[in-house]
Every structure is written in structure tokens, then in C-alpha cells.
Amino acid sequence: MDLQSLVRTISDHPKPGIMFRDITPLLKHPQAFRTLIEGLAQRYVAREISKVVAIEARGFIIGAPLAVQLSAGFVPQRKQGKLPYDTIGRDYQLEYGVDR
């Protein structure tokens, strides 16, 4: 199954020069979504992964089922100020700026 054909490219979003990759067509396709998660899990199954950490939004959509497939815990990585408990912060570079 060609998963890449189910990823739509939207030019100049959220600003000029950015090529946004929209995975919602892939997520709507049950077999494609299953193939994606199983394929990712296959890459890591021998590594004894205990936690999957994923960035909020699209990362949660992929990270949570991947964690289940690997029999691992799931750690949501959120933007600053989104969690009311102890956190660890790190700045990171985006195509169009910096965030934490």
C-alpha cells in the first residue's frame, strides 16, 4: 500500500514557503492507518521500547496507537503551559520560528 499517496501537500500553509503535509486522508483510511502503525512498530519491536514520546496534535494520533502496538507507555509532549504538573522544557526549531 502506497501510504505517501494518502498524504496531501498544501502549499504556503501556515505561511508562504511552508509545505504543510496533511495526514487526514491517511487517517480516514482504516487499512492505511493500520499499515502505518504496524510498519512503524516493526522498526522498533526488537528494541524493548518502554515509552513512546510524541508531540501534541498529529504526534498524539500516531504515538498512542504505536505505544499500544509496542506494549509501551505513552508520554504526551505538550507546549509550554499546557500541563498543570512538573514538566521539563526544551526549545525547538520550527520551519517558521522557535517554540518550547
Image (cartoon, rainbow, N blue to C red):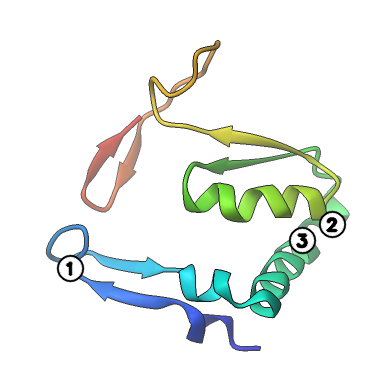
Q: Amino acid type of disc 3?
A: Ala
* Circle 3/circle 2 CB separation < 8 Å: yes
Could you tell whether 71 is left or right of 73 in the image? right
Name the image quarter holding residue 28.
Answer: bottom right
Between the C-alphas of marks 3 and 1, the distance is 32 Å
Between the C-alphas of marks 1 and 2, the distance is 37 Å
| In the depicted structure, whether residue 40 falls above or below residue 66 | below
Name the residue tied to disc 3. 41
At which x and y percent is residue 99?
30, 34
| Numbered tag placed on residue 12 in the rendering | 1
Q: Residue shown at 38%/24% (left/top)?
A: 80
Closer to us: 95 or 82: 82
Name the residue tied to disc 2. 45
| In the depicted structure, whether residue 50 falls above or below residue 41 | above
Under tag 1, what secondary structure?
Answer: loop
Crowdedness near tag 2: few (<14), some (14–19) or many (≥20) residues, C-alpha within 10 Å: few
Mark in the foreground, 1 or 2: 1
At which x and y percent is residue 7?
45, 77
At which x and y percent is residue 91?
36, 30
